[in-house]
Image (spheres, rainbow, N blue to C red):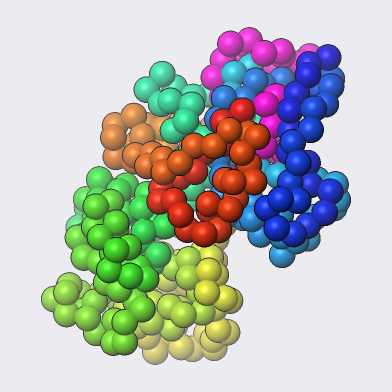
Amino acid sequence: MTTARQVVLNAFGPADVMTVTTVELPPPAAHEVQLRQTAIGFNFIDIYQRKGIYPLPSPTGLGHEAAGVVETVGTGVQGLKVGDRVAYMNAGLGAYASHRNVAADKLVAIPAGVSDEAAAALLFKGMTAQYLLRKTHRVQPGDVILVHAAAGGVGQILCQWGKALGAYVVGTAGSAEKCAIARAAGADVAIDYSQAGWPAALLEATGGRKARVVYDSVGKDTFMHSLDLAAPFGMVVLYGAASGPAPAIEPELLNKKGCLFLTRPSVFPHNADPSVFRANAAELFAAIAAGHVKASIGARFALDEVVQAHQAAESRATQGALLILP
């Protein structure tokens, strides 16, 4: 048995409902490995789940992604050995922990050119960007791409990676400061969508060029504009709803707006098959190792400081990725 420390949620509410407890972790079951975790990624969905906005059974753990080192290998595991550095993003809740048993098919090896912190900070967000840029629409040199919420975690990666792929990147964000962040991440143009008339300002800045693909994680506030800013035969990719659900439309509107394609993908179906997940992650890790995607870590918190970590995220007191270190 391994002594492990983990965050447990017995009730939903403010950050201080989280407690760190000590448990005895059994050996890994068949087809599992036991990890000593080295870096835990934070995602805003963790806050929604802690508050009960996304209902969970109680008690529950929290956290979706982490990196660590294999300490014990269960029976039937192939391709992993003690000492391997690995990461995961979809192994069930419970990443907020010092040690954890994880199904082997949920793990991906971290290559030598990528740090544990970069893997934990970038895997979930980076795999989202990977399917958007390489699967939903395979970005080609010269493509005009429009990234809403370009200063956010996924948005910055889309700007960085899209630029590396040769795209002309147009970003939107909610303030002048955030537009500066988007430009620093690679956006050729960044427009403040909190200002009236921003779609016209965007087209003026691009010389009237519309986007081959629009990546929209904002939803309600941007969706109808996204349809107007997509080029004829272009694609609008709705992959989030930060401002609320996008309005329902009649399919005929896509014809009227320029024979557009509209899709609503998500990251987990794109990575449901273990071999596909590992191939997609390898593409992401290659982009990280090449410097095309960078981990901007804004703050690090110890596991015992998980309450402060959530409070800092909710108050928008940090910029860049937030990490929890066991």
Q: Is residue 152 above or below residue 282?
A: below
Residue 16 rendering spot, x and y as whole percentages: 71, 50
The residue at the point 37 percent across, 42 percent down is 296
Q: Is residue 316 left or right of residue 177?
A: right
Q: Which residues are magenta?
A: 71-99
Residue 6 is drawn in which quadrant? top right
The residue at the point 37 percent across, 85 percent down is 257
Looking at the rendered image, the quarter that the C terminus falls into is top right
The residue at the point 82 percent across, 54 percent down is 11
From this viewpoint, is residue 132 visible? no
Q: Nearer the viewer, residue 33 or 275?
A: 33
Q: Is residue 325 left or right of residue 32?
A: left
Residue 127 rendering spot, x and y as whole percentages: 49, 45
Residue 287 rendering spot, x and y as whole percentages: 34, 36
From this viewpoint, is residue 297 visible? yes
Q: Is residue 96 magenta?
A: yes
Q: Nearer the viewer, residue 57 or 127?
A: 57
The residue at the point 22 percent across, 81 percent down is 201
Q: Is residue 142 above or below residue 37?
A: below
Q: Is residue 148 above or below residue 277?
A: below
Residue 169 rendering spot, x and y as whole percentages: 25, 60
Q: Main secondary structure of the magenta part?
A: loop
Q: Is residue 4 magenta?
A: no
